[in-house]
Image: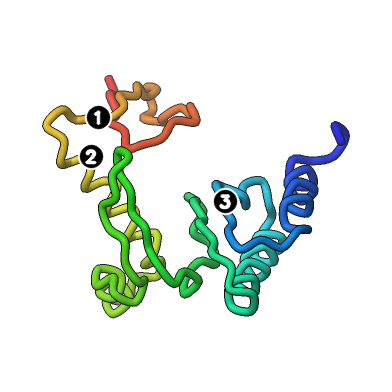
Amino acid sequence: INSISDGQRRRCQLLELLATPRTLYLMDEITSDLDLFAREGILNFMKVECEQRGATIFYCTHIFDHLEGWATHLLHMSQTQVVKYCDFAEVQEYKDLVDGGDPTPLYSLVRGWIYGEYEAHTEKPWRKVGCSADGRIPNLGLAGPFQTICA
């Protein structure tokens, strides 16, 4: 297994996980390392599990590809607290983004929440990142948002 790619390894892990039908799936970043085809296949499989077998899936992700219209409910948590839990159809902010022609309404909705939480803190939790002389920011693999400090 050490000679296969990260995506192939992830597929093997998912096959092992999904081979036994369950009524509840807790999935955190399960589609990371997967290509578009595999990610779409996993999402389609999970949708069928819900619709045909009545399974419940908690799917935590920061990858928003192919998620439009997928969720039936929304759970928004921040700092271990439930901020919002409702039927997805009741999320007016999402409807407004769709009606406004936003090409990525789910991403924009979540991004707005995250940045709003950062702005709400009196102590700004921005990560300070220095940039090079030409203004480029190094890829440090850090979560944002950032406050860039350029000379």
Q: How many marks?
A: 3
Tags 3 and 1 touching, CB below 8 Å? no
Q: Which quadrant of the figure contains the C terminus?
A: top left
Image point (31%, 33%), residue name: 146
Q: Nearer the viewer, residue 30 or 145?
A: 30
* Residue that badge 3 annotates: 27
Image point (62%, 52%), residue name: 31
* Residue that badge 2 annotates: 118
Circle nearer the N terminus (1, 2)? 2
Q: Amino acid at mark 2?
A: Tyr
Q: Nearer the viewer, residue 20 or 40?
A: 20
SS at mark 2?
helix
Q: Position of residue 117 (x, y in %)?
A: 22, 44
Circle nearer the N terminus (3, 1)? 3
SS at mark 1?
loop
Q: Which quadrant of the figure contains the N terminus?
A: top right
* Residue that badge 1 annotates: 125
Tags 1 and 2 touching, CB below 8 Å? yes
Q: Residue furthest front?
A: 23
Give the alpha-carbon distance from disc 1 to disc 2, as whole Å.
6 Å
88 relative to 60, above or below: below
Q: Is residue 38 left or right of residue 125?
A: right
SS at mark 3?
strand
Q: Amino acid at mark 3?
A: Met
Q: Amino acid at mark 1?
A: Pro
Q: Nearer the viewer, residue 111 or 15?
A: 15
Mark 1 packing: few (<14 Cα in 10 Å), some, or many (20+)?
some
Q: Position of residue 88 (x, y in %)?
A: 36, 71
Give the alpha-carbon distance from disc 3 to disc 1, as whole Å.
28 Å
Q: Nearer the viewer, mark 3 or mark 1?
A: 3
Q: Which mark is residue 57?
A: none
